[in-house]
Image (tube, rainbow, N blue to C red):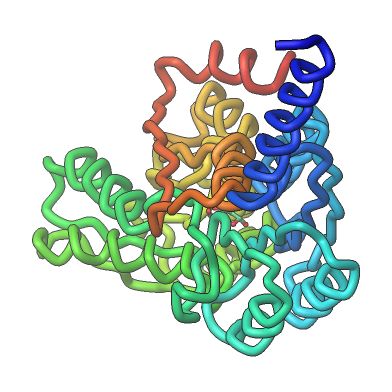
Amino acid sequence: MSSRKLVLAALAVFVLVLMTGVMVGQAQDDLTIGFAQVGSESGWRTSFTNAMMAEAEAQGITLLFSDGQQRQENQIAALRSFIAQGVDAIILAPVVETGWDEVLQEAQDESIPVLIIDRNVTADPSFYITRVASDFVHEGRVAAAWLVQATASRAECNIVELQGTVGSSAALDRQTGFNEVIALFPSLEIVASQSGDFTRTGGKEVMESFLNSIDPATICAVWAHNDDMLIGAIEAMKEQGIDPGDDILTISVDAIPDIFRAMADGDANATVELSPNMGVQAYQAIKDYLAGETLPPLISVPGGMYFPDTAEEEYAARSGS
Ligand code: GZL
């Protein structure tokens, strides 16, 4: 074959590959993704945001970030802005479960794929390409199972509960899982429950109200839907001369560095881990979707459970200190 024909043949193959790539799915380089984050209410949320940003930078993804300040209207406005900008994809970490159908329909009308991350939505799954998250019900069950064994020798255990954000799947599902388990053990009873909105201030204020309305000597344990509220509750207990982790047992979720500090100091007893590192799975899912692949409805993020015996080294490893 003459050299001219060889060049033409190579060119034809190159064009064919290029066209095939375009037809099967969008090019995977220089993606622009809009990320509507809940807010910055907790240490875990901040770690999650930082991890998403770091991973986007590592992959050369342009990440348009919006801090919703824990308000759904801010997140909806952010999604509409991303849609108007014509981003390649949207990642939504929904503050609450309901109220997303209309804006998700708007994204779908513009053929912009939406990935749900962390908390869940009640919207039809056809509105989003997948969800990357941990299992909140499981986290509640594990937290309760630990408390059951930690109080096995007691005739009764009165529990006060610090709920997360009202209407969020993290709070609803953790409560469901926890209550499922303690229902099997009549000696364990939740005697007070109120939302601290996943913040340290909220956890402290609610714990103060519990301690002012319930004889602290009758409180066996505090169950907090996240570590930040528990850290606030620890402050409240200490201010009233109560020894957290001893006079009142503690169990919470997230495994943020400060809970390891608290466990190492004898102020907390256990935490259920929630990994903030979901960027790799999220960005890969978007790339796979854009390449024409079918995604599973849920991409699970695992987590362990931690106790005081490893708290000092875990704190050093996780806080970088
Ligand atoms: C759960 C996440 C929760 C964390 C809190 O995945 O949505 O929200 O447990 C955060 O720290 O506020």
Looking at the rendering, the quadrant in which ligand 1 lies is bottom right
Task: Using the image, determine if residue 311 lies above or below residue 75.
Answer: above
Where the C terminus falls, by quadrant? Answer: top right
Task: Using the image, determine if residue 60 lies above or below residue 190.
Answer: above
Residue at 73 percent of width and 29 percent of height: 14
Where the N terminus falls, by quadrant? Answer: top right
Q: Is residue 240 visible?
A: no
Q: Is residue 182 visible?
A: yes
Residue at 60 percent of width and 26 percent of height: 261
Q: Is residue 121 left or right of residue 199?
A: left
Residue at 79 percent of width and 25 percent of height: 8
Q: Quadrant of residue 202?
A: bottom right
Residue at 80 percent of width and 67 percent of height: 69
Q: Position of residue 159 (x, y in %)?
A: 33, 61
Residue 234 versus residue 122: which sits nearer the camera? Answer: 122
Q: Position of residue 50 (x, y in %)?
A: 76, 38
Q: Position of residue 215 (x, y in %)?
A: 41, 66
